[in-house]
Amino acid sequence: MMKLLIAEDEDTIREGIVNMIDWKSHQIEVMGEAGNGSEALALMENEQPDLLLTDIRMPQMGGLELIEVARRRGYGFRSIILSGYNEFSYAKQAISLGVVDYVLKPCRPEEILKTVLKAKELIERQRYQEDEQLKRDRSWHKNAPLVKSQVLSQWIYHPPVPLERRQELIGELSMAIGFEGPQIGLVSFDFDPPSATGTGQDFVLLRYAALNIISETLSPIYRGKIETFHDGNNLLWIGSGLAGTDSRKPYRAPLQLKEQIEKLQSNLEKYLKLSISIAVGSCRSDISEAHLSYKEALQAMESRFLNGKGGVYYYTEGTGVIGGAPQEIGILDDSELNVLEDEMLVAVGAGSNELALDLLEKWLDRFRSNPGCLKQEVNIRATAFVVRLKRLAQEKQVAGFEWKQHLVNWMEQAPQIETLEELSTILNKVMQNVVEAFSKHRPLHRTVVTAMEIIRNKYNTNLTLEYVAKEAYVSNTYLSSLFRQELGVNFLDYLHQYRVEEAKKLLRQNLKMYAVAKLVGYGEERHFSATFKKWTGLTPSQYQKGLGK
């Protein structure tokens, strides 16, 4: 029901308007009657009308003055003027006050009703438009982050296309960034966050919290000109107008930025218990070069392969590589690596397990000492070496090693390996498998056999080197040395690998992660997940999902 207020000083006319028209049938309620403008204004203070039907000339306060005063007080309504005076000055003033219509007296009730219904329709149309606008505003407020994320993701991958208006789009999407000086930062989880193995909603909330921390921590350095978004599981920010940058000089990350990013790492660890790696591109000239800064950030993140997780890496302009150190020797053409690989194969073939592992460590150190080597080239080199190991086993006619399965696993894991340390772990596992296959042709030391039997029986307990050494009647040091000599691995690594293999069997039964962790001897799911990934290259959840492919 819309509320109608009638202001008319002539009683008969006012009563006729009220009584001769069936207002309720038109969803209109007469909320009040007034004999002059002052009375009408007093009624408005208690209940504001949607519609006002008023005479122009009334005692104390006329209709036009009533409308003007009510408007100043903030009352919102549609008004219709009744008057016995057909004067242009009245009509002109009525129009300036937004009056819907001007009805001359005397008039029939049908004419008044028609005019009021016209005003009612205008109100309904306005309310519908306001409701629709409110829905659009709510929808935009809800979806704005997604739209911004999609647009920014497009910008970091591609240069502008012809006629693309990025500066205008920044304004239209109410982005906080400026057009000039964009800089891209990349935040990568070092390990799958705990919530990533739970419900999808948990991970979305974690990502939302992390993006907020990034924005709040780095906002001061960019003077508020920063937007955060995500691309897959990676978190990104684009900031502009960084204080202290000079486009005329080669880019060097300013000290203030480094200090703030160290604070960011600390905040994410403190509040969300996340270990992350961060890479930052340079400040570019304008938003059309955002993709170049992102490319630099990706290049900088490659440093994580050699330096390990949990670091902060900045693109350094002017050297052509990350970190400012040129690549002295191409990894694929390194003759020293060729020699080390040949010596490793000889050691494995001769059963010299300790020597083979020592040579493997020297081989890996060769990569560590060359900061310019590329992850892809290292993986190519490592894959080629694994193929040579397979060929050696075939030449020696070594049985009992499922090369097809292990080689396929290696090929699948190689692209997912993020650090040289992970590569080292996987290669050690491959080497150990080869050594075990060769060792089947010779008897193992009886102490090692005893220790292996204890592990098979008690791997799901809090088993330690001290306990097993005591049960085998040898010292800790001697038992550890024997494991390395006979199996090419120390006691603790053998225990973890045995547990991981047992865990794989349980994961194939679709058991929950925490249950599998307990059943194979790990008190904490997080420790189990980290150990599983170390020896397989996959998290338990990734391994379980892969079983369904």
Image (cartoon, helix red, strand yellow):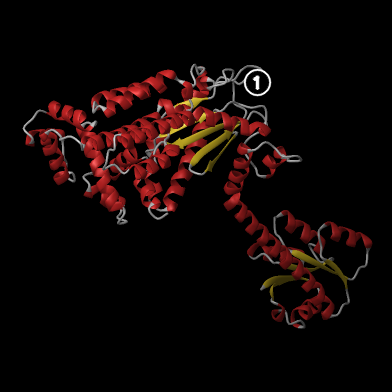
Residue 50: quadrant of the picture: bottom right
Q: Nearer the viewer, residue 213 or 34?
A: 213
Is residue 60 shown above or below 442?
below
Residue 536: quadrant of the picture: top left
Is residue 66 shown above or below 2?
above
The answer, for residue 220, to whether it is visible in the render is no
Q: Residue at x 26, y 23 (%)?
A: 355
Q: Nearer the viewer, residue 510 or 24?
A: 510
Residue 378, given in percent of the width and then of the height, sits at 44, 28
Q: Quadrant of the N terminus?
A: bottom right
Query: Residue reaching furthest left?
Result: 473
Residue 159, given in percent of the width and then of the height, sits at 67, 36
* Disc 1 element: loop
Q: Nearer the viewer, residue 456 or 69?
A: 456
Q: Residue at x 32, y 56 (%)?
A: 510
Residue 257 relative to residue 504: left or right: right
Residue 335, given in percent of the width and then of the height, sits at 43, 19
Residue 386 relative to residue 353: left or right: right
Q: Nearer the viewer, residue 171 or 161?
A: 161
Residue marked by disc 1: 247
Q: Quadrant of the C terminus?
A: bottom left
> What count of labels does the image hold?
1
The amino acid sitting under disc 1 is Ser
Q: Residue at x 46, y 40 (%)?
A: 210
Residue 274, given in percent of the width and then of the height, sits at 39, 37
Residue 4 relative to residue 152: left or right: right
Disc 1 crowd, CA 10 A, few/some/many (<14, 14-19, 20+): few
